Every structure is written in structure tokens, then in C-alpha cells.
Amino acid sequence: MQANVLARTLNMGRDAWLEIRKGGIGGSDAAAIAGLSKYESPVVVYLEKMGQLDQDEPGEAAYWGNVLEDIVAKEFSSRTGFKVKRCNAVLQHPDYPFMLANVDRLIVGQNVGLECKTASAYLKDLWEGDEVPMQYLIQCQHYMAVTGFQSWWIAALVGGNTFVYKKIERDEELISQLIDIEKNFWENHVLAQVSPMLDGSEASGNLLKKMHPAAEEGTETELPLEADDLLEELETAKQEEKGASERVKTLENRLKAMLGNHEAGLARNYVVTWKNIESRRIDSKALKAEHPDIYERFAKSSISRRFGVKAVK
């Protein structure tokens, strides 16, 4: 199998590239559709494909990821001896045209690709040993589905000072599941123009904040009948959450009692710690009372929305 070349990207502008992206599902979209992305949710991907969500300019992390991509590729080549080249094309699955791939690099003389990443030092645990963050594993399997390649390399600069590279082998079972998930999303949501349901992901929460940043004060609306079912379900979920939270606290307290004044305790399969943490915070009330001029100079005003539910008597 060989991928089709949907478009050449060598001199393509960002707007044209974003327009092509709307016409299919890319590697970074795949993890979001499967519910495995921290940064995007199925609803976000749907709105992007429908042109109902403006594409933000790349943030700091994305900007530096693009800047450092070439450095990561060169370091991979230096360490492995493999020559790499840019693809400069949007690739398309020959049987599932909605599956697209914008790959970072191809290995010269091999049917193998390379994905280049940068990652925060806080995420270093996700790269230890043979581990690859799940969303990137899905991305590489998506690329193998589109290209027909049997393997894909991923290289990452973690924390700015740790370089890792790993080979991911083609997983036919996972690829088959991905194709089913993406086909369902494309046909039953994008083409049918039916939005997926919002989920509880951070990405969905951020989307709602972006779409509805501030309420129009004093306004009120009549909610649809579905809201009553959701509210009943919410109340049940809260009670279950409360019970689980109390159970967690009970178990933690029993373990703390066992530790006593010790910082750490050893069990057969776990290490339990109860460490001292020193923290300092500005007493804003005292600062405002004693130095109101300084308080006003540095006080930052912002608007956020607090969600609440109250029973009607």
C-alpha cells in the first residue's frame, strides 16, 4: 500500500494548510477523537473541521516545538546514523481518504518515518524506559495506517536537556480500531454535521471557557427538558464522588496514623510518605490594609464563571 499525495506543502501558507486539515483527520486529531489527548477533545476536533472554531496562533509550547523540530531531527540522525528528509506533502490513505498525515520526517532509503517532539521536564516519567505517551503512540500508529509503513521512530527533547528516541512497531489490531473510530467520527459526526457530546476532559472545559468567557449579567434562559435528566444524574454522581472521597480520606488517615512522626513507611508493594511541605503566601488582606497603594498597583482583575446548582423549592 502507498499513500496518496493530497497536496504539496513546500511553499504553502498556514491558512491554506489549515484549510486542507479541515478535510480530514490528522495524526494529532486521532488521539483526541479516541479520548486520549490532554489538549483536545472530540468536540474540539469536530468544531475545527466544521470551521466553527477559530484556530489560535501557536502558543509558546507549540512555537518552540516547531523551532526545535529541526534540531531534534538532526540529533536523531547524528545518534542513529540514519539520514532523514522532509516530506513536504499532506499524505492521504488510499482507501480511507479522510485519514491524512503531515509527517515530520522520513528515513532515507527506508519505509519508516520520524516524529519529532519537545516535552516539559514535568512529563519526563512518561518517556522512561520503553514508554511513549499514549497520544503520541496513537499519532504514530495513525501515520503507519496512512502510509502502510511497518514502523515509526519518535524522538524527543525532554526538559531541554534529555534526548530520547524510540522505535514503534506497527500494531495491526490498534490500527484497525483507529480506522473504525475515525470512520465513525467522520461519517456520523463531521459529514452528518452532528456534534459529539461534551465530555469531562480539560480540553472540553477550556473550549467552553473560550466560547463563553463571560455571562451577560442579569440574563436568564429556559433550559431544555434534557437538563432535568442531566441534573438528576449530576446529583447522583456528586453523592458517589462524596462517598468515594470520604473513603479515600479514611484510608489515608489510617495510613497517616501508622506513620506517626515518621516521614516514610515501607509496605510490601508500596512506599508511603507524609512529608513536611513549607509554603509561603502573600496575605492580600493585610497588604491591602497596610499598603493599599502597593496592593492596587499589583492587583490583577479577571473575570471567570462559577458553576452552581440549587434546588428550587
Image: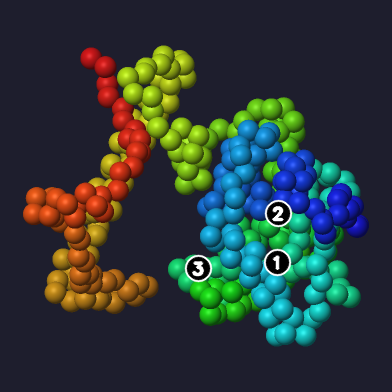
Q: Amino acid at mark 2?
A: Gly
Quadrant position of residue 233? top left
Residue 157 as seen in the image, left or right of residue 275: right
- Near mark 2 (Cα within 10 A), the count class, few <14, some 14-19 or many ≥20, is many
Tell me the residue at 35%/35% (across/down): 305
Q: Dividing the image into 4 quarters, which one contains the N terminus?
A: bottom right
Residue 72: x and y, percent? 66, 75
Looking at the image, which is closer to me, 293 or 122? 293
Against 156, residue 193 (above or below) is: above
Against 186, residue 273 (above or below) is: below
Whether residue 300 is visible: yes
Residue 204: x and y, percent? 50, 41
- Secondary structure beneath dot 1 equals strand
Looking at the image, which is closer to me, 6 or 171? 6
Q: Which residue is mark 3?
A: 120
Residue 271: x and y, percent? 32, 74
Residue 155 as seen in the image, left or right of residue 11: left
Q: Which is more foreground, mark 3 or mark 2?
A: 3
Against 119, residue 36 (above or below) is: above
Q: Dividing the image into 4 quarters, which one contains the C terminus?
A: top left
- Please give the label number shown on residue 75: none
- Please give the label number shown on residue 27: 2
Mark 1 vs mark 3, CA separation in Å: 17 Å
Q: Amino acid at mark 1?
A: Glu
- Secondary structure beneath dot 3 equals loop
Q: Amino acid at mark 3?
A: Ser
Residue 8 as seen in the image, left or right of residue 161: right
Quadrant position of residue 47? top right
Q: Which residue is mark 1?
A: 115
Mark 2 vs mark 1, CA separation in Å: 11 Å
Tag 2 near tag 1, CB within 8 Å: yes
